Amino acid sequence: MMAIRCRVGIALAAIILWSVTVWRPVGAAEPVVGPDHGAKMARGLELFKRAVRPVLTQHCLGCHGEKATEAGLDLGDREGLLRGGESGPAVVVGRGKDSLLVKLISHARTPKMPRGGEKLPADAIAAIATWIDLGAPYDGPLLSRKSDASAWTRRVVPEEARRHWAFRPLQQVVPPEVRHPEWCRTPIDRFILARLEAAGLQPNPAVDRAVLVRRAYFDLIGLPPSPEELEAALAADEADWYEQLLDRLLQSPHHGERWGRHWLDLARFAESHGFEHDYDRPTAYPYRDFVIQALNDDLPFDTFVRWQIAGDEYAPDNGLALKATGFLAAGVHSTQITKKEVEKHRYDELDDIVSTIGTAMLGLTIGCARCHDHKYDPIPQADYYRLVAAFTTTVRSELDVPDPHGYAQALALFEREHRPLVEALRRYEAEQLPKKRAVLVDAWNKKPDRGRWAAIDALLPTGFKLSAVVQWQQTLDPEWQKLAKRVAEHRSRAPKPGHVKALISSENVPPLRLHTQGEDFLKETHYLRRGDPAQKEGVATPGFLQVLTRAADAEQRWRQVPGPKTRTSLHRRALAEWLTDVEAGAGPLLARVIVNRLWQHHLGRGLVATPSDFGSRGEPPSHPELLDWLAAELIRHGWRLKPLHRLIMTSAVYQQSSQIDPRKQAVDRDNRLWWRRPKTRLEAEIIRDNLLAVSGQLDRTLYGPGTLDPRSVRRSIYFTVKRSQLLPMMQVFDAPDALQGMGERPTTTIAPQALMLLNNPQVRAAAHRFARRIAPTDDVDTARIVEAGYVTALGRRPRADERAEAQAFIEHQTAGHRAAGHHDSRLLAVADFCQVLMCLNEFVYLE
Amino acid sequence: MMPQPMFAPPHPRFRSRREFLRQAGQGFGLLALAGLLEQTAEAVIQPMAPRPPHFHPRARAVIWLFMNGGPSQVDTWDHKPELARRDGQELPGFDPTTGFFVNQVGPLMKSPFRFRQHGQSGAWVSEIFPNLARHVDKMAFLYSCWTDSNNHSPALFKINTGMSRMGFPCLGSWVTYGLGTETQNLPAFVVMYDTLGRGLPKGNASNWGAGFLPGIFQGTALKPQGAPIDDLERSPELTDRLQRAQLDLLGRLNRRGLEAAPGEAELEARIETFELAYRMQLAAPEAIDLSREPASVHRLYGLDQPKCAHFGRQCLIARRLVERGVRFVQIYSGGMENQLSWDGHIDIAGNHRGFAEETDLPIAGLLTDLEARGLLESTLVIWGGEFGRLPVSQKSAKPGRDHNPHAFTVWLAGGGVKGGTQYGETDEIGFKAVVDRVSVHDLHATILHLLGMDHKRLTYRYNGRDFRLTDVSGNVIQAILA
C-alpha cells in the first residue's frame, strides 16, 4: 500500500492541482522545466536559505520530519515535500498559491498550520509561495536521516533528469535545407548531407549496380544473389528496379532469418539451461521461429515487444503470441539449486529478465540499479525492484501452442526419431525373442518340473497355452521391456495434433522443474538493500521507470485489474503498455533504440554508437534529429519495420561506396558524418550460409527444430544453441555465447578463423561441391571455371590479372595433385581454387 | 615481435586505458578489436600482442592446478588437532543447510590421514602428499579462503570469474586481455580437463569463457581425444606444397584487393592471420608432443605410473606450453562431481587418497622441473578447488564430507611468491576462515598483482559500465609477496 501511494506521489511531482476538495492527478504531463529553469532554481535556493529554511525548521519540522511525520508529511528533504502526505502533494512546483502547503499556512484551508501555533507572518508565507513558484529547491536535507533506512525505496527522480536526450519526447523535426539537394534520394540524406556540407565534405560516389545488388541481398536476406538473379538485376531497365528488388527481398522468407538473428543476440537466446548440467531445452526453438515469422510478417514492432513480455496476457489463444514469451524464458537457469540459494537464484533470474528488457528494448543498463541507485542514469534502485515485481509470479512452462505448420515439422522430426526405436523393438521381437522362446518351448515340452508347469497349465484355456506363454515370456524379457518402454516414453512426447510444445513464460501454469530444493518463485518481490536477499526493505509493487513516465495517471493508464477468470496478474501487460506508450511512457525511447539498430546493421554503426546504452555513459547520437525523425517515421508507419528498411536502403547515404579517402579521413577520421558506407564483416552465420549457398548445398527449409550437427546444410540460425557446446565455427567468428544480451558483436580477426577456412572438413566439403558446380565435367574450359567461380562467390567477373593468376593456379594444382597420385586431380585443383575464393577478404567483407 | 616487454623496467603510467592500449599496439600488424576501444581507428591493434603490464611483473605465466569438486582443507594442508580431539561429537548450532545434503549431517570427524611437518617452514602436510611435502618451502599457503556458494557451479564460476553467476570473463581471459601473449603460434590460454572420460567441471566451458570480453580471450580446451585443437590438421588431399600454393594465391589476390581499396586495417590484418594459421599448424602439435621429452622427464612427472600418468602428461604439456610463451594454463584434476572428482561426499578417505595419488607426483615433478629450468621464478603455480569441505561428516557407510563455502586452502608457488609462507587461519576445527580472511577477489587481486597488473585498473567497458575481475573489492595479500 505504502509503495503505491508513494509512486502516485512521485508521478505528481509536476502535476497541476485540479480540485480544491479532491486531490487527484490529471494528465498535464508537461514537466515544469522551462528555459529559465536554472536561473529560477538558483534564486529559489537563495530564498530558501534566507527566508524559507528558518521558517520550516522553526515552525514545521518538529511534527513533519523530526519527531514525527504527521499526516505522513515529511518536510525533512525535498523528496518528502514533493511526495506529500495523506492529502496528496504538499506543493505544486511552480504554483505556490495553488499549493496545499501555502493554503494551509495562509489558513485558506483547514487544518490551519502550524497547528496550535500562531499564523506565520505574511512575509514568511509570501516567501514560501515564491519559493515554490521558483521550483522549491532545497540546498540539502534539513535532517540527517540515519534512522530512515527505507528512504531509498521511495526515491524520486528529479525533473532535470528527464533532460538527457534519450528521455525526451520525440522532437518534431523537418529535414534541413542543403546546398546540393540533387544528391538526396530520401529525407534521410538531407540530414546527412547538411552536416557533411557544413564540414566541407562530399559524400562518396554511389557504388555500381552489381555491388548494390550484392549489398541488398546480404543486408536483407543474408544470402548472395545467384548468378541468374544477379544477371537479371543487372539487366533490369525499369526506373524503379532497385525499389522492386528491395520489395522482393523484403518479401523473402529469408528476411526473417537474417534479421531474426540480430534480435536473438539481444534476447540471449539459447536452447539449454546453462549452469551445471546445461540440460537441453528442446522446446525453446519456437521462440526463435516466432522471431523469424514476426519479422517476415512485419508484425508491428510495438506488438512484437508487447508479446514478448506478455503475449499470454494479450492474446492467450494465439500461438505466435505465446511463443513470443519465450523471450522471458531464454536466459540461463540453474538446474541445481540448494535450499540456501533458492532466493538468490530467483532474484538472479528476475534480474536477467529485467536487465535484458533494459538493454534490448530500451538501451538502458537497468541491471546496474540492482545493488544501488544507477551510478550514471536516473534509475533509482527502487525503480529496479518495481520493474522486477512485475515478474514476481512469472515462471517458465511448457505448453502445447497452436501451430499447424510447426506441428507438421515437429511431427516429421518426431517420426524420424521414433522410427528407429520402433524398429529396434520389432527387430528384437523378430530376431532375439524367437531364440529365447525356443529355449522356453523346449523347456515346456520337456516339462522337467511337472508341478509348477501343471499349475500354470491349469490356468490357461485349452489351445492358447503356448501362445500365452510366449506372450508372457515376452513381457518378462528385460531387454524387450527396455525397448518397449523406450518406444512408449518417446510416444508420450509426440506433438499434439495442430500444436507444438513451446517453452513459454506465464503465471499459474505448471513450472518447469529441475533439481530445485525449494519454491519456483517467491510470493513477493522485496526491495533488497545492496541487492542482498538477506536485507529486505519492504515489498515492492510493480511499477515503471520514473524517468520514462510522463503520465500523471500512470496506474490507471496502463494497469488493468484482472477479472475473476484471468489466470495472470496482468502486471506484465501493464509493463508492456508502458514500454510501448509513445505519449506518456517509454515509447519514444523504444522507437529510437530500434531504428538505431536498423541503421547500425545497414550502415555498420548506429547513429548512437552504443546501441544498447542510450544512457549518459553511452555515446550521444551523431545525428539526433535524424534519429528522432526515423523514430517518428517508424511510429507513423504503424511500427512496421519493413518500410524503414526500404527507406534507409533507398537513401543515397546507404548507396555510397566504402572507399577510404585520406582527405575526408583527415576531417572526419571515424566517419561520424557518414561520407562512406563502411565495409562490414559478415557474421559467423552469414559466412557459413554463404559457403553453403555458393557451393549449392543450402537447404532452404524454414523453421522447426534445429540441430547440433556441424554438417547440417540448413541456414545457421537453425543450429541448436547449446550453451556448453557452442559450435566452433560460430564461435570463432564472434557469435555470442548467449549468456547475456548482445547489441553489437565484436569483429575479431584471428588465426583460428583462418585455420577453420583452411582445414575445416565442412569448408573443404563446400569447396568440393562448389568445384563440381562450376566444373561439372572434366572438359569445362579453365577460363570459364574461373569466370563462374568469381561470379558465384563474389558477384563479379574476374579482372584480367586475377583470371591469369587463377588459371595458372588451377594448372599448378592439377599437376601437383596428379603428382601426388590423386585420380580426379583437376577437380581437386578446382576445389583448391574455390577454397581460395572462400578465404578471400572479399568473400567475408561486404563492400 | 615487440622487444620483450614483460621484464622491462616499470613502465610510465599511462594517462588512460586508451593511451595504454595505443602504445601497446604500436608497431604491430594491425588488427581491429571492437569493444576494446569502441571501434575507433585507434582500435586497430593486435589483440594478442604482448602488452606491458601496469608495473613490474613477477610472473609472466600462470599454471592453475584446479582440484575440481572441492578438496577438504582439513584432510590436505590445514592441520586441526582439535578436530581429532572432538571426533564424534556433535557440532552445536550447526546449520544443516551449510552443505548440500541437508539430511545427512553427522558429527565432527577427524581426518583419516596423518599429518607431519615438513621443510624449513614446518608446514603441516597430510600423508597423502608425500611428494608435494618436499616442496612446501616453495609454497605460500592461504588457509583462510572462503567463497559465496555451497553449490559446485556457482562456486566454480566464482573462483574462475569472480562472480557466482554465469557469463563473466574468467581469470585466464582477463589475464590474456590485459597482457596478450608471447607466442602467436599457440593459443594464449589453454585448458586441460580430465582425459579419463569422467567429465568436465560443472558449468563446462563457462569456467574458461571470456564472458563479455571478445571471444578470442576465452580458454582453448585441448580435447582429450582426437586432434587436441580444431582444424589444426590439413585436409589429407593437400600436401604442404599444395596448401602453400593456395596461401600464396590467396595472399596475392587479397593484397591486390587492398591496393584497390587501401586503408582497411582489418583487411590487412586478415592477410596476416592466414600466415599465422599456417605456422600454428606446425607449432601446436610440436608443443604437445611429449615423445620429444627424455625418459627421465617422463618419470619425473609420473608418466610411467598408471595411476597418475594422465595428469602427469597434462602437467608436462603445461610446462612445454609455458616454455613456448603461452600465458595461462589451467588443468582440472577430476571429472564432474561426486566420486569422479575431489567431491568426497562419501568415503572421504578413499576419494582423497585416490585423487592425491593421481596428482601428487605429477605436481611435484612440475615444480621440480620448472625450478630446474629457471621457469619457476616467472611462472605462478596455483593449487586449489572451488570450496572446502565440512569438519562434520556426511553420513554414509564410509563417511564423507559435504561442501563448505566458509573455508578452503589454496597455495601459490613460483613467480613472485614468498615460499614457505603460511597466511590466515581457520577456527580450531577448520570450519570457518577466521584470521586474515581471503576472499576470492583478494586471491584474484593478488594473482593479477604478481603478473604486474593493478586489479582496479584492469577494466573493460561493457553495457555502460567498466567491469573488473574483482568487481568492487579485492585486496592484494602483501604478506605472501616475495
Image (tube, coloured by chain):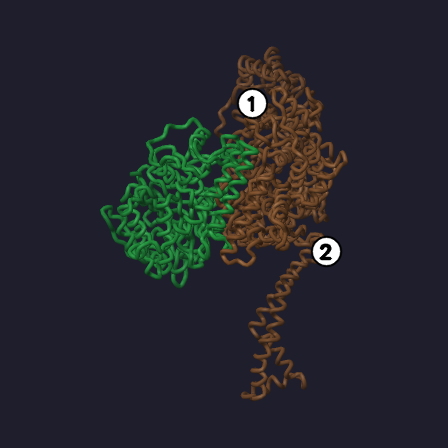
Check the image and name the residue furthest to the top: A123
C-alpha span from label 2 to label 1: 61 Å
Residue B142 seen from this side: yes
Q: Which chain is brown?
A: A
Tag of residue A498:
2
A569 vs B147, nearest the viewer: B147
Q: Could you tell me which residue is drawn at 50 percent across and 47 percent down?
A: B245
Residue A6 seen from this side: no
Q: Is residue B207 above or below residue A470?
A: above
Percent across and percent down for residue A1 are 62, 36
Check the image and name the residue furthest to the right: A238
Please state the chain letter of the residue tagged with numbered disc 1 in the rendered image: A
Percent across and percent down for residue B392 are 38, 54
Other-residue count near label 2 (Cα within 10 Å), few / some / many at <14 / 14–19 / ≥20: some
Disc 1 marks which residue? A667
Type of the residue with mark 1: Val
Q: Is residue B109 above or below residue A349?
A: below
Please state the chain letter of the residue tagged with numbered disc 2 in the rendered image: A
Q: Is residue A551 left or right of residue A355?
A: right
Chain B drawn in what color? green
Q: Is residue A559 left or right of residue B474?
A: right
Tag of residue B274:
none
Q: Quadrant of the C terminus of chain A?
A: top right
- Determine contact: label 2, label 1, CB under 8 Å: no
Looking at the image, tell me whether mark 2 or mark 1 is earlier in sequence order. 2
Other-residue count near label 1 (Cα within 10 Å), few / some / many at <14 / 14–19 / ≥20: few
Type of the residue with mark 2: Gly
Q: Secondary structure at mark 2?
A: loop
Q: Secondary structure at mark 1?
A: helix
